[in-house]
Amino acid sequence: MKEIYKLMRSAGISQSYRGYQYFAAAVKMISEDETKLSNIRKEVYLPIAIRYKENIQNVERDIRTIRDVIVRDNKPFLKELAPGEPYDIKAPYPREIIEAFAEYVLQNRPIKKARE
């Protein structure tokens, strides 16, 4: 989770946003199993809502807020995170931002050495 929090701070996402923990949890879940993207509401948002004792609509809204902050305040970061995507033309769906964060975390995670 440290890598996710660091990446979120780089994107200008403050812990003061209600969706901060939700977004981090979603990125972690997708980085562990990207097939959950195909049914993100049921397989990601619902477990987060249950974990934080929140309703699913609030989780979705708060994650959209995180997406909006990145798109509004940090387009250069978004271009670096997902090069080639047409995010200048239209804002990405929250699932696309979550996927981009998860891919970045997986690609930049240090490789753990096997015990000898």
Image: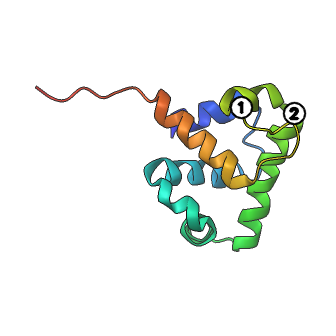
- Which residue sits at x=47%, y=36%? 106
Q: Above or below — where is 75 with respect to 65? A: above
- Which residue sits at x=54%, y=68%? 43
Residue 35 is situated, as x and y percent measured from the top left of the image, at 48, 59
Task: Name the N-terminal-most of marks 1 and 2.
Answer: 2
Residue 29 left/right relative to 90: left
Amino acid type of disc 1? Gly
Residue count near mark 1 (Cα–Cα under 10 Å), binned few <14, some 14–19, many ≥20: few
Q: Which residue is mark 2?
A: 73
Residue 82 is situated, as x and y percent measured from the top left of the image, at 67, 34
Q: Above or below — where is 15 with respect to 12? A: below
Instruction: State the SS at label 1.
Output: loop
Residue 97 left/right relative to 67: left
Residue 1 is situated, as x and y percent measured from the top left of the image, at 51, 41
Q: Residue furthest left?
A: 116
Residue 45 lies in quadrant = bottom right
Mark 1 and mark 2 in contact? Answer it, CB < 8 Å.
no
Residue 61 lies in quadrant = bottom right
Q: Nearer the viewer, residue 35 or 43?
A: 35
- Which residue sits at x=68%, y=71%? 54
Q: CA distance from mark 1 to mark 2?
A: 19 Å
Residue count near mark 2 (Cα–Cα under 10 Å), binned few <14, some 14–19, many ≥20: few
Residue 47 is situated, as x and y percent measured from the top left of the image, at 55, 68
How many marks are shown on the rendered structure? 2
- Say which mark, if any, is on residue 84: 1
The reply to whether residue 78 is visible in this rendering is: yes
Residue 106 left/right relative to 89: left
Amino acid type of disc 2? Asp
- Which residue sits at x=76%, y=67%? 58
Q: In the image, which is nearer the foreground, mark 1 or mark 2?
A: 1
Instruction: State the SS at label 2.
Output: helix
